[in-house]
Image: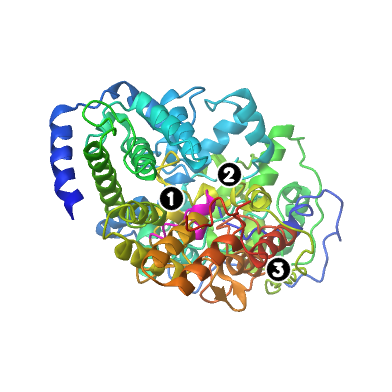
Amino acid sequence: MRWKAAVAVTLLAAVGSSVPADADACMRMKRRRVQAVDHKLQDVNRAEHLLAKGEGKRAVKAAKRRFKSFTAATGSPDSGKALFNRAQRTIALATVRADGAMDLGRGMRGKTAQDKALNLAWATAVLEVQAAAEPDNLLLRTYYAEALSHHVGGDAQARDILTQLANDDLMPTARGYALLARTQQRLGDASGSDLSLQRCRDLGEGDDICSVA
Amino acid sequence: MKTRWAIVGLLVAACESEPQAVLSTEAVVDAEVSTTPTAPPEPAAEAGQVEHGQALVSKYQCNRCHDIDGVEPPELDYDCAGCHQKILAGDFEATEEELSHWQGRLHSLDEVPSLSGTDRLSRAWVASFLPAAHDVRPNLLASMPRFDMPDADAEAIAAFLVPSAEPERPTLGDAQRGRALLSEKGCMSCHRMTGVPAISALPTEEPLAADVLARGQKMAPDLRWARDRMRPASLVQWIVDPKAVKADASMPELGVTEAEAADIAAYLTSAELEPVALGEVPELPASLERPVTYAEVYDRIFGKICRHCHSDPDVVIGDGGPGYDGGFGFTKRALDLSTYEGLRSGSLDDDGKRRSVFKEVGGKPRIVAHLLARHSEVAGRPVEGVRGMPLGLPPIPMDDIVLLQTWIEQGRKKQ
């Protein structure tokens, strides 16, 4: 796929030019729950919360605040890899949901069609890498499927990932069923799409989530 | 060794001081016992086996709960007992509000027997106990988990904990007299001895400080196990001066002479025991008519108990717990019960593939079956192939399990 070539360039550039700027956090990461105030954790939690509410731009802003080098391949050992990954995937998913139209910083403003494609490619690669690195995390797998579904020709692969989860009764979210319904519809499987939408609604979600629009 | 089935119903009655039937003459004991166990005295353990056992203690993460001679304590993030104790003591770095909230909900691992002075124990008993732990200290809330431990591993760990050769076995005394002494010396202020006619619980000759008594009552083993757990010479020495055997022993010195200790040991090792009584397994109540929310189930079950061992390590401190990463010698299950999405994502099967926690086992969703199995375990009726959860803790009350069952039946909605 074209996005893979594009992202390789982006990632290489990003890794080469960025040094994680969060090395001040070493002990705080070890004890992040017990600190009265841990701003880095707070910001990541807030970013995830905002994204869940559909406020992608604000989510990206919150996540970027403490992880300015979010385009790096990984966090520095001192920064806490897990927290870095959470921040990075939040930014990536928000970018996917905005079809790349997200201001991620210099060279990644997401204004032109080319910028958007580049952002989307970067975000998809991030989610692919994270999903591959954590195969036990099914939520990451659905994020990756969601990213794929935003690429031309990506629906079939996204549908296959999500169908497997649905068949095994392992779909982590109602949104996953909605996404499955969308990919099925686009691929011409109307009855499958209806069933997936119903399973989405069975989990108590309304038309804001459970739709193919 | 922190060992007990958590038979909650028995806890309250465990140390009551109300006099029981006094010195029943129906106790079937030999009047004079010369302890000559059928098994020969244990030789010193082989050095290689001791070394292997020490490595296995790391593998099974015994130090997450126990202080162990010769083993470093874990970091606080991995220290289950240390974390609980710090919270209860108010030493944990957290806000007042958090501490107060946790302290109100935290009831287990406030005391855990250290693994020091373990040479007092029978190595054979330790080896047989570890793969099939049962209740030894009925007044402690948490209990030794049912490990998935091969016999060979248990034998190596036993060699590490009990490396020395068994001392010469003493000649024990008058068992009938020993039974009387158990009462007169105040032993039953803390201990119980199931399987024999009740022994009256007289107070100790010298009143014990309240904190000493409270700790003693909490930690006291059921004396029916002493004959298998303890090496005879250590048993006598322990009764005379517990801290000479184990420096942090919770049992106080009670002014028992060596001859009296030999009498008591005679009774403990020879009194005829009734078999351990099996408990009744309660029925799961009928599902609720009212709507049940995920938030309610989380608050009563997953958030309160399960997530301590089943959490995504990306989100919590530590390793996500043995139920996620495979600590305590268990296979990695990657089960995250700290979030709705994690719950829906299931867990890894033995073949490494994920399966839903809602898949039915014996007519119940798997996650419900595990909670019910814990009730069966504490009743002495473990369920083949279904490990009871929560591991080593009292069962989740049936009224809470039915909440989960109802929520599942109502479609497992997030809102």
| Element carrying mark 3 | loop
Which of the two marks, 3 or 1, is nearer to us in this view? Answer: 1
**Mark 3–mark 2 distance (CA, rounded to whole Å):** 40 Å
Q: Is residue B256 in view from this perspective?
A: no
Question: Marks 1 and 2: same chain?
Answer: yes
Indicate which disc, 1 or 2, sits on the residue closer to the N terminus.
Answer: 1
Horizontally, residue B121 falls left or right of residue B410, namely left
Q: Position of residue A122 (x, y in %)?
A: 24, 42
Instruction: Give, as a single range, the part of the protein colored magenta.
Output: B332-344
Please name the residue shown 71% across and 39% down the image.
B214
**Mark 1–mark 2 distance (CA, rounded to whole Å):** 13 Å
- State which chain disc 1 sits on: B
**Mark 3–mark 1 distance (CA, rounded to whole Å):** 41 Å
- Name the residue carrying label 1: B62
Q: Amino acid at mark 2?
A: Leu
Q: Is residue B154 above or below residue B327?
A: below
In magenta stretch: residue A148 = no
Q: Residues within 10 Å of mark 2 (few under 14, many from 20)?
A: many
- State which chain disc 2 sits on: B
The answer to which quarter of the image holds residue B23 is: bottom right
Q: Amino acid at mark 3?
A: Ala
Indicate which disc, 3 or 2, sits on the residue closer to the N terminus.
Answer: 3
Question: Marks 3 and 2: same chain?
Answer: yes
Which of the two marks, 3 or 2, is nearer to us in this view? Answer: 2
Please name the residue shown 18% across and 44% down the image.
A7
The answer to which quarter of the image holds residue A118 is: top left
- Name the residue carrying label 2: B109
Residue farthest to the bottom? B362
Q: Amino acid at mark 1?
A: Cys
Nearer to the camera, B5 or B181: B5
- Name the residue carrying label 3: B31
